[in-house]
Image (cartoon, rainbow, N blue to C red):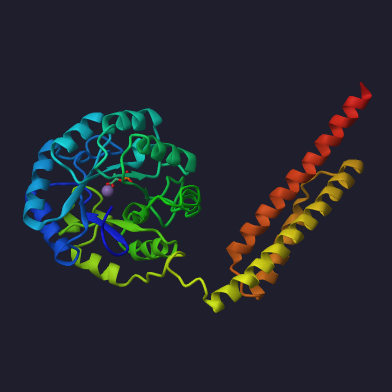
Amino acid sequence: MNQPGKPFLIAGPCSAESPAQLLHTAKGIAANYPNAIFRAGVWKPRTRPGSFEGVGEEALVWLNEMKAQTGLRFAVEVATPLHVELALKHKVDMMWIGARTVVNPFSVQELAQALNGVKQVPVLIKNPIHPDVNLWIGAIERILNTGINDVAAVHRGFHQYGHSQFRNDPAWEIPIQLKSAMPDLPLFCDPSHIAGNRTLLAFIAQRAMDLDMDGLMIETHFMPDLALSDAKQQITPETLKELLNGLRIGQSENEIDDHSDELKLLRNNIDAIDDELIQLFAKRIGFSEQIGKYKQENNVTILQIRRWKKTLRSQIKNGTALGLNENFVKAIYQLIHDESITVQSQWQSIKTSVKETTKK
Ligand code: PEP
Ligand code: MN
């Protein structure tokens, strides 16, 4: 993905709708970002039948006309071997595999077979709909095994049950896990499908930059309100420019001066605190084990709900008085308490099985 600067930009409508829609949108993008990749869905995976499902192969002809007039290279989504065949026939510059396809290793393997030997066309792999980093890694490995030179991952959020401010839960820990497992793989973010609306786009794009992601895929349409799919989340090329101009882009780990004393000193402090925290956690778990033993011997249930609520309340009070975020304190204490319960019940089941064995 040889595009200068950061973030690597992929922009364009959710779906290709007409030659004029592609051209107007592309001209707006090319005016500011001539190196961007223009995206447009040609075959649309829709949740319910009857929604706009894309115009198919004809749109690939339109995209080539758009490219001839604006110089923008383009990407489409492929979900079946036939899509791959047609995309290659119409000389796409990049393909992406969507979230609904990545969930199914059979489908990804079929795509990998269709891509075997292609090598020169970059492929983006969106995260699967559910937050399973191994399923995502598996799809990436299947595509890498075809010998394709250029592969990148796209974080587009995860399905969530119930209401939230996001259309798809960003679950930032999952792309962080992917980055740890595959540090050399370029990682992009698709704020459009995470947000599902226009207001949260900049916030999500900024978070992606803060997490040192390499690129952004942003749905852009010259008349977003009239879009045939995902109208609520698309923005105009002008808004795209404002959004990108507003991003703070820090230096990556490999770009910063290794000898920055200030950063080194601050990190030394963090490292020392982390060492202390781990020792304290271990000490605390030691007491949980002793409590487990006491409860077993005195026939007391492991969960004591009033005691737990009191602990949580008082730590939230302490934490917030020190300026900590209430949700952060709650989340930490829930983890600690879960572990404490696990340790206590493990202790009890060990003792019970020892008793049973000695009885025999
Ligand atoms: C899309 O990019 O238009 C799309 C369908 O995305 P996803 O696979 O992330 O839902
Ligand atoms: Mn879309």
Q: Along the horizontal axis of the image, is 11 left or right of 203?
A: left
Vertical relation: 23 (above or below) 292: below
Q: Along the horizontal axis of the image, is 254 left or right of 3?
A: right
Residue 120 x, y percent position in the rendering: 24, 42
Name the residue: 29% across, 31% down: 116
> What is the tally of numbered marks visible in this picture?
0
Residue 355 can be seen in this image: yes
Residue 277 x, y percent position in the rendering: 71, 63
Name the residue: 61% across, 74% down: 323
Vertical relation: 172 (above or below) 258: above
Q: Residue furthest top?
A: 360
Residue 310 can be seen in this image: no
Residue 41 x, y percent position in the rendering: 21, 44
Residue 142 x, y percent position in the rendering: 38, 34
Name the residue: 56% across, 78% down: 261
Q: Along the horizontal axis of the image, is 24 left or right of 81?
A: left
Q: Quadrant of residue 330?
A: bottom right
Image quarter of the C terminus: top right
Q: Along the horizontal axis of the image, is 359 left or right of 46?
A: right
Q: Residue furthest front?
A: 259
Vertical relation: 208 (above or below) 129: below
Name the residue: 9% across, 55% down: 23
